[in-house]
Image (cartoon, helix red, strand yellow):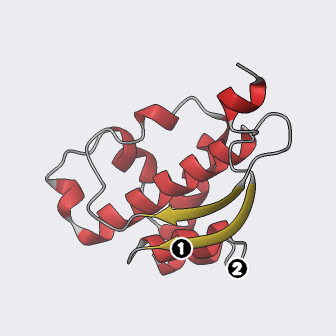
Amino acid sequence: MTDRETTGGALDGTAPRTALVFPGQGAQKAGMGQTWRDTASWGLVAEVSEYSGIDVEELLLKTDDETLRRTDLAQIAVFTTEVLAHREAEAAGLLGDVVACAGHSLGEYTALHAAGALPLADTARLV
């Protein structure tokens, strides 16, 4: 197999055009931040905590499912996780030529941020 066949062109600069779609609330679960904890993007968790006034690291690493059912906590947790995933995929060169960003419900905020229409600080405050 060629690199193109195994990576979809992400490594050789010929990746296809990409549309990003972000989910809404309901995708949250206890420990949802564990996957992202040791990534280069993890620092944004402290930023979102500062902007939102919520301890997002606590939410992503230690909060139980019952607590995450609260809308005010679930939404900031899901938003932060979506931004973490987006940043890591972008840094890894996996996104190709992003031509559209969309979201369902809460995911619309992440889509606006990913598209560059809203800075992180403003988006975190809105969520």
- In the image, taking residue 74 as reference, residue 65 lies left or right, namely left
Residue count near mark 1 (Cα–Cα under 10 Å), binned few <14, some 14–19, many ≥20? some
Q: In this picture, is 46 found above or below 124?
A: above
Q: Residue at x 69, y 30 (%)?
A: 5
Q: CA distance from mark 2 to mark 1?
A: 12 Å
Look at the image and tell me in which quarter the C terminus lies. bottom left
Q: Of callouts 2 and 1, which one flags the residue occurring earlier in the amino acid sequence?
A: 1
At horizontal 42% and vertical 33% (from top left) the residue drawn is: 34
**x%, y% of residue 35?**
45, 33
What residue is shown with label 1?
102
Residue to which mark 2 is pinned: 117
Which of 125/119 is in front?
119
Q: Is residue 59 left or right of residue 40?
A: left
Residue at x-position 76% and y-position 39%: 9
Amino acid of disc 1:
Ala
Observer-nearest residue: 110 or 122? 110
Viewer can see residue 120: no
122 shown above or below 44? below
Q: Position of residue 118 (x, y in %)?
A: 67, 78
Contact flag, marks 2 and 1 (Cβ < 8 Å): no
Residue drawn 55% across and 47% down? 85
Estimate the x, y position of residue 86 in percent, counting from the top left. Answer: 60, 52
**Residue 118, numbered label:** none
- The part of the image, by quadrant, that contains residue 40 is top right
Q: Secondary structure at mark 1?
A: strand
Circle 2 SS class: loop
